[in-house]
Image: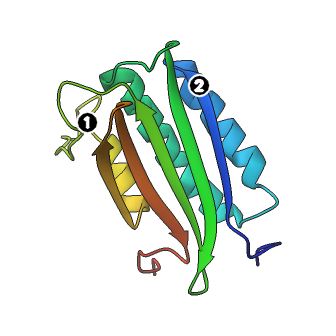
Amino acid sequence: MPMSAAERTWCLVVPHHPAGAGQARHRLAAELASIIRPELISNAVAVLAELVGNAVRHGTPLPGDVIRVAWRVRWAGGAEIVDVRVTDGGAVTEPQLRDGSLDATDGRGLAIVQALANSWGVERDGLGQSVWAEVSWPSHQPAAV
């Protein structure tokens, strides 16, 4: 149960470097620890890590050699929802879901995002490219038996 029914939003910049994903994960987990249930935090952290990792590997940095990371917590219809958004300077190609083979060393990031998120997408504007995802609890996925 949320401490408050008010929507809350956070925004930060992290380095356009693999360490940026760790910084974003730790900050999201710390900020949300007393607000939402641990299962939702775990899923939101995994989604955020994948999106930041993809921005570092495939995107160009924003001015200052950074990536902008934002998340919002809201409550709707009995669900806790975390919206995450990662903005970089853009990439040559738009992020796409790929079929990663079992022996592939990469290519599963957006499949993980799709499995954990209700929805995700890509938006471009004058600043660059944002990849967003909505993660909720109860999850949109059927419970495992």
- How far separated are the C-alphas under marks 2 and 1? 23 Å
Given residues 140 and 99, the one toward you in this image is 140
What x and y, as percent, mark residue 6?
Answer: 73, 71
- Left or right position of 26 against 132: right
Which residue is tagged 1? 107
Which residue is tagged 2? 14
The relative height of residue 9 versus residue 57 in the rendered view (above or below) is: below
| Residue located at (42% from left, 61% from top) | 117
Outermost residue, front side = 126
The relative height of residue 97 versus residue 77 in the rendered view (above or below) is: above
Q: Residues within 10 Å of mark 1 (few under 14, many from 20)?
A: some
Q: Please identify, in this view, whether the residue under mark 2 or under mark 1 is nearer the observer.
A: 2
| Residue located at (49% from left, 74% from top) | 139
Of helix, strand and loop, which one carries label 1? loop
Q: Can residue 17 be seen here?
A: no
Q: Residues within 10 Å of mark 2 (few under 14, many from 20)?
A: some
Given residues 5 and 96, the one toward you in this image is 5
What x and y, as percent, mark residue 89?
Answer: 36, 24
Earlier sequence position, callout 2 versus callout 1: 2
The relative height of residue 136 versus residue 27 in the rendered view (above or below) is: below
What x and y, as percent, mark residue 24?
Answer: 61, 35
Q: Amino acid at mark 1?
A: Gly
Which of the image's four quarters has the N terminus? bottom right
Which colour scheme appears in the figure?
rainbow
Q: Which mark is residue 79?
A: none
- Left or right position of 140 against 108: right
| Residue located at (46% from left, 33% from top) | 52
Of helix, strand and loop, which one carries label 2? strand
Q: Can residue 71 be seen here?
A: yes
The relative height of residue 99 versus residue 117 in the rendered view (above or below) is: above
Given residues 11 and 24, the one toward you in this image is 11
Q: Amino acid at mark 2?
A: Val
